[in-house]
Amino acid sequence: MEIIKIKKDHLATGLDALKKSYQLFGPVKKDSCHEFKRLEQDEQPDLNFTNTRLSPKALIYPQSETMFTYSLDENAEDAHILKEAVKTDVPKAVIGIRPCDADAFLLVKRNFDAPDYKDPYWLNAYAKTTLVGLACENPHKTCFCTTSGSGPFSEQGLDILLVDIGDDYLAKVLTDKGAALAKAAGWDTPADSDSATEDIECLKAAAEESISSSVDTDHLKELDTTALHQAPFWEDAAFACINCGTCTYLCPTCWCFDIQDETCGAKGTRMRNWDSCMFPLFTMHGTGHNPRGTKKQRVRQRFMHKLKYYVDKYENGTLCTGCGRCIRACPVNIDIRKICNQMNHYNPDTVEEPAS
Amino acid sequence: MLGYIDKIREIAKGILEDKKIDMVIGFRQGSVPMMNEPCIIRHPDDVENLVWDSHCGINLANYLAGRTEKIGVIAKGCDSRNIVNHIIENKISREQLYIIGVPCKGMIDRHKLADMAAGEIVAVDESTDSVMIKGADFESTSPKDDVMQKNCLNCTHRNPVIYDILAADLVEEQTDTDRYVDVRQIEELSVEAKQRHFTDLFSACIRCYACRNACPLCYCPTCFVDESRPQWVGKGQDTIDIHTFHFLRAFHCAGRCTDCGACERACPVGINMRTLTKKLEKDCAELYNWEAGLTIDTRPPLDMFDVSDSNAFIK
Amino acid sequence: MQNPYLPYPVRIDEIITETEDKNLKTFKYVFLNPEDEEKFAYRAGQFAELSIAGKGEIPIGIASSPTEKGFVMFTVNKVGLVSSHLHAMQVGDIMGIRGPMGNSYPWDTLKGKNLVIIGGGFAFTTLRSSIIYLLDPQNRSDYGNIDVIYGARTPGMLLYRDELAEWEARDDINMHITVDGTDDPDWKYLTGFVPTIADQKAPPGDDDTYAIICGPPIMIKFTQPVLDNNAYSHDHIIMSLENRMKCGIGMCGRCNIGREFVCKDGPVFTLAELNKTPKEY
C-alpha cells in the first residue's frame, strides 16, 4: 500500500485534471450546510466540514432513478414492452467522503449483491465510482462510528484515504481504482512511508479518542428475535415518532425502494424511488390489511432491521456505521444509540410488565 | 418560562394521583442539545422526568388525535389552538382533556442557533432573555429574540386560548407586530419571479414528509400524495410533483393553520414552507376576518357556508 | 448481468372468468420470445410479477403446472390498480411477466409422503399448480395419498370447476369439495367451513403426512388448531404467505417477516419456521 503526499494547492490542480476523465463529486457549502454535488469545471470541494447533512448514498443510489422506458403507442412495434434505460458509463469519483459513509456502501452492497440476484443499477454505479475518503479529525458529539464497526480513519470501502496533516494531505492508496485515480490526477510524490504511517496512526488515535459517543452491540446476536420483538420498551420508544422519512432518507445504510410507472402521453418510464419503512403504505396490502399498520410496528421494524435482522442475516455487525445523522436530524429526538442499548441489554426474564 | 417546570410537575402529579386523567403528554430531557422528546407520563412518581424550557417547540397537539384515554396535555398558545382545531374536527373530545396551559415567550430555533455557532454546540444554557451556547473551543451568548423560531417572533397568541389550569401567569401578547411582511414580499413578485422563488424554496425537498407528519392538522388516514386510485401526484423527484405536494397541503390547512411552526421546525433540509400557509392565513384574515383555533364554538370558514358570504358563488 | 427487474414480454392468449362475481379471471400467457419460456422454468408454489407498462406490477402465484407446456397461467383477483386494469385487458394484448420468484413447495422433502392440501377461496391457484404437477403420470408414483380439501363461499365461487369435477372422478386423489352454504338442490359435494371439513376428512398427522395450507387468514387461523388436534407437527404444516411486494427478489425491503423476505425466502414456510418470526403478514 502506497502513501502519497499531496500539497494542499496540488489537490485542486489534480482535481481539475481528473475532470477530464471523471465526473467529480464533493462537498459544497450551500446556506449553512454541506452537501455532495457535482463539481463543475471551475468548482472545488469545500473540505472544511464535519459531515454532509444528507448522506452521499444518492451518488450511487439516486432518490429517483429510471429503470425502463416504454411506449403505449399501439402503432409502435414495441408497444407495452419495457426497454432498459440508457445509462452513462462515465466513471465517477467522490472526493471527501467520510469513512463512515464509504463503509455504509459495503453494508448496503450485501443487499444488492446477493448470491442469487444482482441489482444492476446499484452495482454498476458502485463499480464505476472511485471513493476518495477524508479522514475525520473533528467528529460530531453524535458520531459513534468506533462502536459501529467503522471509525474516523476507517479504510473499509475506500479507494484512497486522505489525511489532513496541515500543509499537505497524506493519501493512502488502498485499491487499484485508487491508484488509477491518483495517477490521473498527477499525484505522484511518495511520502516517507515510515513517518507518514506514524503521522497517520497518531492522528487516528487522537480522532478515535475524540469519539465520545458509543453503542453496545455485543448481545444483539444472541437475543431471541421474537422476545425482542415483543419487548415492552417499543411503546415508549415509538411514542414521539411522527413516522416521517427523515431518518431513513438521511441514513447512508437505508436502501428500501418503491417501483412506480409514470406515463406522459404515450411515453413512460418505470422508475424506482427511495421508500421508507416509516410510511404506512410501504407494507399495505391491496385488501387494506397492513401487517405493520401502527406507528410502533414501523418504528420497531426500522430498529429491528438495522440492529437485529441484519445482524442475524449477515453475521457481520449492525446495519449502521454510527454517522449520527438520524440523531441530529430527527424532528422529535428519537435516538438510535438509546434504542440500540435498550435492545442490547434487553432481558425478557427481568422485564417488568408495563402498567396498563 | 424557566421556572414553569416545578409547577408543571406539581400539576401533573396532582392530576395523576387524583386519577383525573390516565396520562400526561409532555416533554422529557432530550439526548442532544436544543431538543426535548415528547413523552407519556403514566405514574405520579415519573413526573420528575418532565422538562420545560425553550426547546419544547414540537406541537403536542399532534399526539392527541384518535386517542381514547383521558389525557393531561401541556399546551403552549399554539398547541392550545391546535387542540381547539382537533375538538372542532372531532379528533378528540374536550372532556377527554385536562389542558395544562403554558404561557409562552417563544421557542428557540435550533437551526438558527447552530448556524450562528462557531462550531458544534455541546451545551446550551438559557436565562430569561438570553441563550448561552458552548462548544469545544467557543462560548457565546445571544439575546433570545435573535435565535427564536420565526413564527414565534410575531406570534400574537402566546397564551393558551383554552386550558383547565395555568402553569404560570399569563404573558403579555405581542400586538404591534406585522405578521405578513414576508407574504407581501412574495405577493408583489411577478408570476415568473414567484415561480423562481418557489422552485428555489423547494429545491432541497426530499419528500420525507416530516412537515406533514409534524403538523397536527395532517391527520388524514391516507394523505392525497399516497392515494393510488386515482394517483394524484407522482412519486419521484419531479419539481411539479414536489410543488403539488406542498401547495395542496397548504390549501388543506387553510383556515386551520395556527402558524405553530411545526412543519418548518421538523424539516431536515431547512425549507420554510410556512410562507405558503401564512399566505392562506392572511387570505382567511382578509376575506373572512378569521383566525384559526381561537374558539371551539365557531367552525372555520372553509368548513361551512354562510348566505351572507361576500362572494357571488353562494347566491 | 441479467437484469432481474426486466419482464419477459408476453401475449394474453386466453381469459377465463372463473367466479360468479366475475372478480376472478384466469389469464393464459404465451411468451413472445420462445426462449423466454425456458428461462421461466418454475416449480409449483412459486409466483411471478405480472407487469403492465404504465400501471406497474403485481405478485401473483403461478396457477399453471411446470408439466403444462406452451403457456403460463395466473388467476387474478380484482383488487387494486394493476389487477383492475388487467381485468379490462383483452386476448392478444401485450404485457410482461417477471420471475419465477420465491421458493415453491418443498417437493423434494415431500417425496414419498402423504399430502393433505387445504385451500380456501381464491388462494387455490398454486394448489392447482401442485395438484396438476402431482397427478402427472411422471410424478404421481413419487408421492403417497393425496387428500384435497377445498372450500369457497358458494359453488359459483369455486375456481377451476371443470378440473375439480375431473379430479373428483379419479381414484388416485381424494377430493373434499365444500361450500360455506348453498341453496342449489343439485349441489352434490360437501357443505361446511374448511376447518370443519378438515377435522372430518384430513388423515391423522404422522411423520409421513404433510399438510399444505393456502387461504384467507381467517381460514388459516381456524384450520391450524384442527391440524394440531390431529397430531400434525409444526414442521409438517406448510403455508404460503402473501405480503405487499415490489421487487420480488429480496431487495426493496418491504415484505420481510423478521429476517426472512416473503418474496425470496418464502412465500412457502413451515409453521415451525413461522413460529420463530414476528407475525408481520
Image (tube, coloured by chain):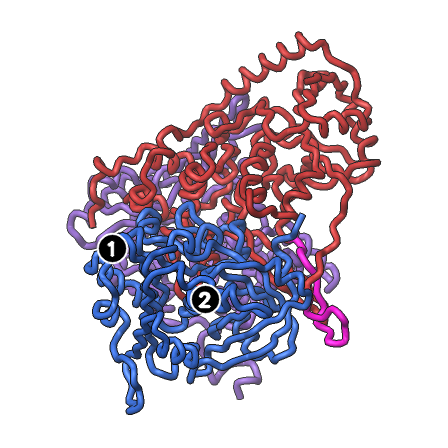
| A16 lies above or below A228 | above
**Relative to C264, is A21 above or below?**
above
Farthest residue toward the bottom? C185
The quarter of the rendered structure image containing the N terminus of chain B is top left
**Res B285 seen here:** no
- The chain displayed purple equals B
Subunit under mark 1: C
Q: Is residue A77 left or right of residue A216?
A: right
Chain for colour red = A
- Closer to us: A154 or C87: C87
Locate residue C62 relative to residue B21 in the image: left or right: right
Q: In this view, does B287 lie to the left or right of B221?
A: right
Marks 2 and 1, the one that precedes in the sequence = 2
Q: At 76% from the left edge and 47% from the top edge, which residue is drawn? A: A88
Queried whether the magenta region covers residue C95, the answer comes back as: no
x and y percent of residue B17 in the render?
16, 47
Q: Is residue A276 visible?
A: yes
Location of mark 1 (residue): C206
Which residue type does callout 1 highlight? Asp
The reply to the same-chain question for discs 2 and 1 is yes
Cα separation, mark 2 vs mark 1, equals 26 Å
Crowd band around label 1 with a 10 angstrom C-alpha radius: few (<14), some (14–19), many (20+): some
* Residues drawn in magenta: A65-81
SS for dot 1: loop
**To which residue does mark 2 refer?**
C137
Instruction: Name which residue type carries label 2.
Output: Pro
Q: Is mark 2 on a helix, strand or loop?
A: loop
Instruction: Give the colour of chain C.
Output: blue
Q: Would residue A77 be counted in the magenta stretch?
A: yes
Residue C127: x percent and y percent? Answer: 41, 66
Q: Position of residue B105 (x, y in %)?
A: 43, 45
Q: Which residue is drawn at 68% across and 16% down?
A: A166
